[in-house]
Image (cartoon, coloured by chain):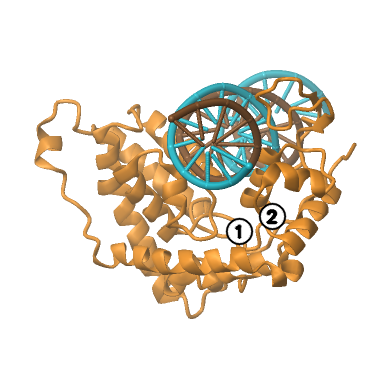
Chain colours: A orange, B cyan, C brown
Amino acid sequence: MSKGRITTKSTSNPNEEEGSSIDLRRGPWTLEEDNLLIHYITCNGEGRWNSLAKCAGLKRTGKSCRLRWLNYLKPDIRRGNLTPQEQLLILELHSKWGNRWSKIARHLPGRTDNEIKNYWRTRVQKQARQLNVDSNSKKFLEAIKCFWMPRLLEKMEQSSSLSSSSSISSISTPDNHNSASPSLATNKTPLASSSPLADSKKCSSDSNNSACNNSIEGDSCYHIFSHYQPPEMSAEAMESPDMNFSECQISEADNWFNDDMSAGAFWNTDELWHFRKPEVGI
DNA sequence: AAAAGCACCAACCGCTCTTTA
DNA sequence: ATAAAGAGCGGTTGGTGCTTT
């Protein structure tokens, strides 16, 4: 997505990483900058972001380079809608760990903390708002467990039985629940294989290794749901005066879920890497 | 057809923790 | 032991494009 926030920043604050008075670029990255970064990391590896930025000839902070690499350019990044498995996992892990996005992201190979955070804020919190409950409340947690998780599982089962004839098989079917698992994250998906770095990633062994490491963890994580039982409303929940959902809320939750599902917004994966439109560079 | 509103998500910020010299 | 630099994290912002009015 092309953004318009293109500015330069003159850093004189000693706390700024660069600490120099050179003009630093901010805002959306240009194709040229991406290529510079990719090329540099491909040849020299990642790390030492501040000096990397300088050596690569980028007028960016090290932080900005790191973020761009980790959230967008890294070869094993997966893009597109989250699969039901991934959504389920996010809901589950968030209920365990709260807003520990990077921790959660480690269990979703190819997904970034930023992406998960955005998902939570735009999709999940929105639904909490619509239900008029706090997204961190027990009540909302119950809603997730009692309504949405079972439906996600249902959806997973459905697509599993359809997977043989499904055209979205490679990414989003549970059968292929490697979709979120790492075997997938190794650049074999259409998504990744057409990522900007796909062709030049060969010598980026570090990131590949990390993908492999993730995969083990990720895979095991997916097994969490193989024995998942939709929970009954807990006794505590039933007793709590503000824990019971009104029929209206329940039907709203249902409608929301069904709408989103039918619209495909919730789990269809657009398999095509949408290449960035040409950026307006400086 | 135009304006307003909304959703999405890339990128930034400030802070903390870890590593290095 | 300590200060500085590097790395990572979570929260927030704001531009773009789509949808609704």
- Residue at 82% over, 25% down: A21
User: At label 1, which amino acid type do we have?
Assistant: Ile
Q: Quadrant of the C terminus of chain A?
A: top right
Task: Report whether A147 appears left or right of A104.
Answer: left
Q: CA distance from mark 2 to mark 1?
A: 7 Å
Q: Position of residue A156 (x, y in %)?
A: 39, 65
Q: Position of residue A199 (x, y in %)?
A: 76, 70
- The residue carrying mark 1 is A77
Q: Position of residue A143 (x, y in %)?
A: 28, 41
Considering every residue shown, the one lying at the far right of the view is A282
User: At label 2, which amino acid type do we have?
Assistant: Leu
Task: Please state the chain letter of the residue tagged with numbered disc 1 in the rendered image.
Answer: A
Q: Are marks 2 and 1 in contact (CB under 8 Å)?
A: yes
Any part of residue A259 in sight: no
Assess disc 1: are there few (<14), some (14-19) or many (≥20) residues with their C-alpha within 10 Å of its C-alpha.
many
Considering every residue shown, the one lying at the far bottom of the view is A164
Image quarter of residue A246? top left
Task: Please state the chain letter of the residue tagged with numbered disc 2 in the rendered image.
Answer: A
Q: Position of residue A71 (x, y in %)?
A: 62, 49
Image quarter of residue A159? bottom left
- The residue carrying mark 2 is A73
Disc 1 is placed on an element classified as loop
* Disc on res. A169: none
Instruction: Tally the marks.
Output: 2
Query: Front-most of B5 and C21?
Result: B5
Any part of residue A155 in sight: yes
- Residue at 48% over, 80% down: A164
- Residue at 80% over, 32% down: A24
Q: Quadrant of the N terminus of chain A?
A: top right
**Both marks 2 and 1 on one chain:** yes
Is A238 rendered above or below residue A164?
A: above
- Residue at 71% over, 70% down: A203
